[in-house]
Amino acid sequence: MNAERLSRGPDGVDKDGVPFEIRESRRTPKYRLQKDVHEELCRRNGYYLFKRGKTITKVDANDVTLLLKKGGWNRDRTYPYKFLSANLVQE
């Protein structure tokens, strides 16, 4: 993939100028999504690349919003976040 890495916010911008975030699930079947990055991806019509094992799934950020649990963002870290079940994004 031809992409430019960003220093803040989403992980990078693809060749078409669309921002993306790469999330990987290793030990637990869930992905941690940061609120500020998610809002940036939604605002700029970005997408996530979810990696679990050797499988990589591309999902638009606006579609991910529908998969997130309703309610507030967790705040026990220095940044607000929500978990997304890996089972919801696998094809």
Image (cartoon, grey):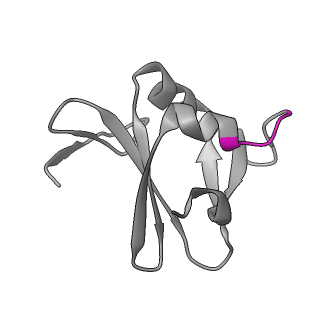
Give the x, y percent position of residue 63.
Answer: 56, 36
**Which residue: 80% across, 41% down?**
75
Position of 37 with respect to 27 (left or right) is left
Position of 70 with respect to 23 (left or right) is right
Give the x, y percent position of residue 70.
Answer: 83, 35
The outermost residue toward the front is: 91
The one of 52 and 75 positioned closer to us in this rendering? 52
Give the x, y percent position of residue 91.
Answer: 51, 63
**Which residue: 61% across, 47% down?**
33
Q: Is residue 51 magenta?
A: no
Give the x, y percent position of residue 17.
Answer: 21, 29
The picture quadrant where one finds residue 19 is top left
**Which residue: 17% across, 32% down?**
16
Magenta stretch bounds: 67-71
Position of 1 with respect to 28 (left or right) is left
Q: Is residue 3 above or below residue 19?
A: below
**Which residue: 78% across, 37% down?**
73
Q: Is residue 42 above or below residue 67?
A: above
- Residue 37: tell me if it is visible: no
Position of 40 with respect to 26 (left or right) is left
